[in-house]
Amino acid sequence: MNKTALITGASRGIGAALAHTFAKSGYNLVLCCHNSQKELMMLADQLQHQYHIQVLTFTGDVADYHFIEHMISQALTYFHKIDVLVNNAGISYIGLLTDMTIDDWNHIVATNLTSVFSTCRCIIPSMVATKSGRIINISSVWGSTGASCEVAYSACKGGLNAFTKALGKELAPSNIQVNAIACGVIDTDMNHCFSEKELLALIEEIPAGRMGHPTEVAELALSLAEGTTYLNGQILTLDGGWI
């Protein structure tokens, strides 16, 4: 039987690359997005026809615990088991901390960090019952080093890294592995807020001389999903030697 992967923030960028990569390896998929329902449905149709897998799609706010609870309940009813959870959904905020409102802060924390609590809280019991499962969190190098004018985003990713390390220890006795990928500059819409000049200056700082591709993140995630069970609670940096 095919394994099943649940991927949040799956309609574009890293999320869409994750969906393609796992589908190509024969995984059935549970995909969700917030606003891009049309794009997500098109992606699901493409993957089903190209790889002959089954895909469930959901549209909603990952910051809403009840949405997460409903999605995972429906997915487990349909597929009976979710083998891999990839927490990819995330948003950024670029600006001075003093320009942020409390609503801005709460929104980014709920989307980037609380959503990971929600997905894990809802899916772990089924993984524990089968003594198997992989949880992969898409993090950022800013979670380790911090970024000026991205204090909230950095705080969320730092929290995500600590969450990963702690949960990996908690779930290791149940043969469940929890790891994270700390991404550097990846060629996604999130980084297209910068001008061409700013991006070129940024790329000059990266020893690899280029931005990463979403497919490279996806391939590393797949290796975490299918590799050794002895790797647990780790933050793997994927940044072209930048940090």
Image (cartoon, helix red, strand yellow):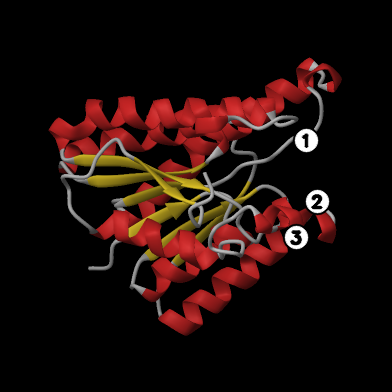
Find residue 113 and report its horizontal and vertical position in percent: 54, 29
Earlier-in-chain disc, 2 versus 1? 1
Can residue 63 be seen here? The reply is: no
Earlier-in-chain disc, 1 versus 3? 1
Q: Name the residue that disc number 1 marks.
A: 94
Q: Secondary structure at mark 1?
A: loop
Q: Name the residue that disc number 2 marks.
A: 193
Q: Residue at x 75, y 30 (%)?
A: 149
Q: Is residue 227 above or below residue 157?
A: below
Figure quadrant of residue 23: bottom left
Q: Is residue 199 above or below residue 166?
A: below
Find residue 51 and report its horizontal and vertical position in percent: 42, 80
Q: CA distance from mark 3 to mark 2?
A: 13 Å
> Which three-letter amino acid code belongs to the residue tagged 1?
Ile
Earlier-in-chain disc, 3 versus 2? 2
Crowd tier of the residue under label 2, counting other residues whose Cα lies within 10 Å: few below 14, some 14–19, many 20 or above:
few
Q: Is residue 105 above or below residue 56?
A: above
